[in-house]
Amino acid sequence: MGLKLRGDNPSVFVTYGWCRSSYAVLRSLGRKGLTVHVGDASPAAMSRFSRYAASFSRLPDFFVEPERYIDCLLEALKKTGAEILLACHEDVGLVSRYRERFPEHIRMAVPSWESYQAAEDKLRLMEIASQYGCPVPRTYAAAEWELEKLSKELAFPVVLKTRIGNSAKGVAIAHHAEELKEKYRFLADTYHLAGERLPFLQEFLPGRAGGVCAVYDHGRPLAFFAEEYLRCKEPGRFGTSTLRRTLEEPALVESGRRVLDGLKWHGPVHLDFIQDAEGVYRLIELNPRPWGAMALAIYAGVDFPWLWYRLAAGENLTFADIKPAKIMCRWILGDFLALGNRLRNGLWGEAAQILRWHSGCYHDDFTWTDPFPFFAQNLDYLVKYIKAGGRMNPVTKNMVR
């Protein structure tokens, strides 16, 4: 049941078209016959080359030119005639912040600016999650002069984080006291952090990594999905996941629900957890937007983009208690990057595991019925890799702060 597809269903504009999460949204809605327009800063954005993309609009980098981005996005909406806006990355925060600039006929489902600010700040989120009864790692907001004292109290390794960042940017691991000081200073200097924006410390969690995915309607949950990360771009399940599977873990979902209920969330959201030594899942961060591994949930039967579209369109939705299929999903390009990382570091056993074939495994970035986005994605990453001087996880200005 739900919104009936007709010829006059409002068209939709999807942002951040270079990313596989946006491609998952585009493909989900396009396969249902909806008119989907795409925007991005890169001319080689993978979604642009999808059979489901009705048009493509070049937009500025919203990290670098936030106000101009909103201006260009408004112009693109006017030009395409799209009435539903699905902001698919950190630009969701900009859309929330400048919501009053959008015409009334443009519909969307984004969190309030207050909720978004609370969620994207990793240090503040730890305080909020703890208040709502969600387990979190031991966390320390420390000035540089306090590191020596903390080094005597902490068990290494220790994780260092900036308050805002994505895809493991602004995250480092220190294995001894001297390295802790070095990496603390590196993060502070590299990202020009000072005062209350200085890096903070967290205990290292050694267990399994998992995520909770959800869509909310003003503090009311519409759907949940849990996943386990089997492999990431960096060794030790560090960084963006490249291979994951459906996870049935009610306690994990309940922990995520406590936080999202408390934040009165609205729209899609994703939470990352890692188990401690006792097996308790502890929240490490919240992605206040669509997540990279969204394809897994869609293939498993939880169609988050469709729910998000219907929510934005104004449909009165009820909780969808869906039993997801037990499947695996792989990011092909991400696994290629992970393979290169393992080979450079002499991790031959882990490299061999990446080459292992998984029967029945789905893919984030390739389907036989829509193959061209995969090749555009590879070209886009190559160009960005070259421009970034050989860095596989380049950082744009204002991305980490």
Image (cartoon, rainbow, N blue to C red):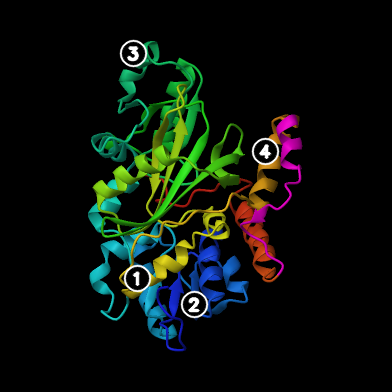
> What element does badge 2 sit on?
strand
* Residue stretch rendered in magenta on the structure: 349-368
- Left or right of 16, for residue 100: left
Pointer 1 or 2: first along the chain:
2
| Cα distance in 3D space between marks 1 and 2 | 16 Å
Q: Is residue 191 visible?
A: no
Q: Is residue 92 above or below residue 14?
A: above
**Coordinates of residue 131 in the picture (x, y in percent):** 23, 35
Residue 352 shown in magenta: yes
| Cα distance in 3D space between marks 3 and 1 | 50 Å
Locate residue 250: give its quadrant. Answer: top left
Q: Amino acid at mark 2?
A: His
**Pointer 2 residue:** 37
What is the quadrant of the C terminus in the image?
top left
| Cα distance in 3D space between marks 3 and 4 | 34 Å
Pointer 3 with pointer 2, Cβ within 8 A: no
**Coordinates of residue 101 in the picture (x, y in percent):** 26, 73
Q: Which mark is residue 341?
A: 4
Q: Which mark is residue 24?
A: none
**Pointer 1 residue:** 312
> What element does badge 1 sit on?
helix
> What element does badge 4 sit on?
helix
Residue ID at (44%, 74%): 13
